[in-house]
Amino acid sequence: MGRPGAKNLITDIPGLKVGHAADERLRSGVTVLLPDQRAACSVDVRGGGSGTRETDLLRPEASMPAVDAICLSGGSAFGLDAASGVAHWLARAGRGFAVHDRLVPIVPAAILFDLTNGGDKDWGDEPPYRRLGWEACAAATANGFSLGDTGAGFGARAAKLKGGLGSVSWVEDDGLMVGAMVAVNPVGSVLTPGNRGFWAAPYEQDGEFGGHGLGLAPGGLDLGIAAEARIGPPVTGGHTCIGIVATNAVLDKAALRHVATMAHDGLARAIRPVHTPFDGDTLFALATGAWQDAGGDATRSWLIARVGSIAADCVARAVARGVWAAAPQDGAASAGQVMRPDR
C-alpha cells in the first residue's frame, strides 16, 4: 500500500531541492533539480527530436558515478546553455566532481521546443538561458512549488492545449519513495477523444487533476474517431516531454537505467501518440540512496522492478497534473476550458 507524499511533489523525497526561473516576455523557462549530495543518475531518451547534454556520462559503463544537478529547459538547442549557468552556480558553491585540485560540476540536461509559442525570442547577442539556469539554482527549495506555467513548463504546449510542469510523489508503507517531475510539451494529446477526460485518469490520486476520469462515451473508445489522438500533416516546429523520476532507494546507474526505461511507460499511459519523430522525450532517473531494501542485494532486481513500476505511474500522473495546472496562453486553451461537461 502507499499514498502521495505530504506535498505530492518530487521534493517529498528528502535531500532534493527544485528551483525554477522563467522569462515572461520570452515565454520560456528553466527548472533545476538539486540533490543535497551528489547522486547516482541515468537516462533514457526516446523519439526523433531530442536535445541533451552530458547524457553519455550516464551510460552504465561510463566512469562518472553521480551527478550534481539535472537541468530541464525550454528554448530548444539554445536552452542547453541553461546547464552552463547551473554548473557555474554549483562551482561557486564549491560543488562538483573532484579532478586533481579542481571541482567540475556534472549537470546533465534536456530541452524542449517552445520557440514558436508567441514569446519574443529576439534576445540579442546572448540567449538568456545561462542566466535562467543560475536563477533557478538560486531559487531552489525543498518546500512546495507551483505547477503548470512554471520553469521549463512556462511556454510548453500539449498538442492544442497549454502544457506545463507537473510533479507528484508516492510513499510506500515501508518507506520507499518515488517522485516525478515532467515538463509536458508533446505533439500528442493528453485528453481522450472529445476532450472528455485524461488518458492518465486511472492513475489519478485524490482528484489531483480534476477528477474527470477517462470520460469515454458509452461502449468505450472508438479508435476510428479518435481525432485528438492522431497527427495529421503538417506538424510544425518541435515538441518533447522532458522529466525526472527520483527515489530514495539505493540504486546505481545500471539499475537507474532500467528505472528510466520503465518510467517512459508513464508517458505512453498519459499521451497519445508518444515518442514520435517530432518528440525527443527524455527521462532522467536519480537515486538519493537514503533507503535500503531490507532484502539487500539479493532482491535488487525486484527493487528495480518495483521502483520502475511506481515511477511509470508517477510520470503519468505528473503529465496530467502539469497540463491541468496550466493557464491558457496565446490561443492555447487550458484543459479545464475544453473538458466537455456532457461527458
Image (cartoon, grey):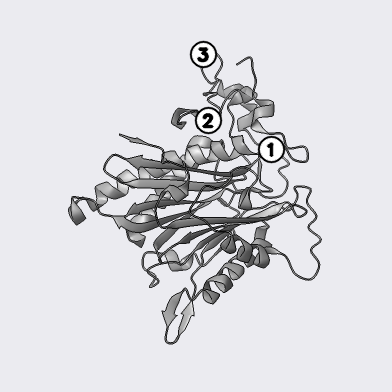
Quadrant the C terminus occupies: top right
SS for dot 3: loop
SS for dot 1: loop
Q: Is residue 331 left or right of residue 317?
A: right
Label annotation for residue 199: 2
Q: Is residue 29 left or right of residue 310?
A: right
Q: Where does residue 3 sit, x and y in percent of width and height? A: 37, 36
List the single residue furthest toward the top.
218
Label annotation for residue 219: 3
Q: Where does residue 33 sit, x and y in percent of width and height? A: 51, 58
Give the crowd class for mark 1: few <14, some 14-19, many >=20 residues within 10 Å.
some
* Residue on which disc 1 sits: 327
List the single residue furthest toward the bottom.
101
At label 1, the amino acid type is Ala
Give the crowd class for mark 2: few <14, some 14-19, many >=20 residues within 10 Å.
many
User: Do the CB atoms of the residues marked 3 and 2 lie less than 8 Å apart?
Assistant: no
Residues 255 and 237: in front is 255
At label 2, the amino acid type is Trp
List the single residue furthest toward the front.
143
**Quadrant location of residue 63?**
bottom left
Q: Where does residue 154 sit, x and y in percent of width and height? A: 66, 48
SS for dot 2: loop
Label annotation for residue 35: none
Quadrant the N terminus occupies: top left
Q: CA distance from mark 3 to mark 2?
A: 16 Å
- Label located before the other in sequence (3 or 2): 2
Residues 165 and 222: in front is 165
Q: Of discs 3 and 2, which sits in the foreground? A: 2
